[in-house]
Image: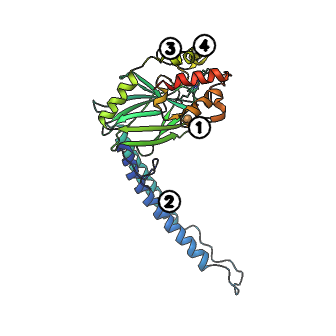
Amino acid sequence: MGDMPGNIFSPLSTPAREIFHLSWLVLAVTGGIFMVVASLAFYAVVRYRRRKNDDGREPPQIFGSNQIETAWTVVPVLIVLVLAMTSTRFIGRIQAAPRPPNAIDVTVVGHQWWWEVRYPKLGIVTANELHVPVGQATWLTLLSADVAHSFWVPRLAGKTDLIPNRVNQMWIEPEATGLYVGQCAEYCGLQHAKMLIRVYVHPRDEFDRWVKAQTETTPPPPAVSSGKRVFESNACVNCHALDGTIANGRYAPDLTHLMSRATLAAGAAPNSPETLRAWLKNPDEIKPGAHMPAMTLTEDQLNQLTAYLLTRR
Ligand code: HEC
Ligand SMILES: [Cu+2]
């Protein structure tokens, strides 16, 4: 079970581990209460079940006992107090953590239904994927372009909401390399369930190579120039940005390094030549209700456009 990529019980980053420890306390206390209540209920059900020779009279009615009333008020209040105060202490500790000077800065903007991912200091813009170095803190600034979303990668940290007109912050500090998956954790509309996020944690040199690849754009080979023309002569350019073309829209995912990403449309489909073509033909087939219209291109245009986009890596 420890290998499950979204497992809340196998934290691999400081905030997630703190929450995991707190969850043991909460589970132990609530589990204890459950055992006491369940065994008393079970005892009562068995011990006082209906018998053949019952005389049908009511058992003695007890009320107005100050001792009992006080006990079952004070004990739960104490339990709630302990849980609330411990939670507050953990939340405070995570939120007040000082930002290390070498932390990576990432801005994540929630959209219906995908994640815009920006590295302002590195000049990188991508979507639905975060790439970070191992053993180093990454500071996330969370914004929303439309409705409330929630960023949640269970093995790295707790949930933090992305709220319109508000700036939220959170941080992660992954201890092991690999892929960590998460999803939007705040119902945000039709395709909320297909709003997945992937966090790739790299060894330092691999991360540097990723940064380098994301900051370079190669001109498209001449063979796909007709596809580039299809792209530039359609409304794609109003919604999407793509370096080296006239497209600079911010409404939709940046396509400059489209093929460096593992999935299309926030995990709705794997990113392959076939699914890419199918997406361009009719996004609704893959993600019903997605905010990208079917562009009614001809089969030739679709082939040319797909061939062009496949070179954007
Ligand atoms: C009205 C705005 C709009 C137009 C026009 C538009 N798109 Fe999109 N596109 C979107 C949105 C929004 C998404 C994200 C959908 C989602 O994930 O829910 C998207 C997603 C995509 C993706 C997947 C990106 C990724 O990383 O997952 C590709 C590829 C794409 N569009 C290509 C195109 C091309 C090529 C055209 C022109 C033929 C085009 N789009 C026209 C809004 C638009
Ligand atoms: Cu969402």
- According to the picture, the residue beneath numbered tag 4 turns out to be 233
Mark whose residue sits in front, 2 or 4: 4
Quarter of the image for the N terminus: give it: bottom left
Q: Are marks 3 and 2 in contact (CB under 8 Å)?
A: no
Mark sitting on residue 73: 2
Between discs 4 and 3, the one toward the N terminus: 4
Q: Are marks 1 and 4 in contact (CB under 8 Å)?
A: no
Between discs 2 and 4, the one toward the N terminus: 2
The residues tagged by marks 3 and 1 sit, at their Cα atoms, a distance apart of 31 Å
- Residue drawn at x 28%, y 30% is 102
Q: Are marks 4 and 3 in contact (CB under 8 Å)?
A: no
Label 4 crowd bin: few (<14), some (14–19), many (20+), radius 10 Å: few
The picture places residue 203, in percent across and down from the top left corner, at: 31, 38
Which residue ends up furthest to the front in the rendered image? 223
| Residue type at numbered disc 1 | His
- According to the picture, the residue beneath numbered tag 3 turns out to be 245
Total of numbered circles in the picture?
Answer: 4
Report whether 6 appears left or right of 47: left
The residues tagged by marks 1 and 2 sit, at their Cα atoms, a distance apart of 41 Å
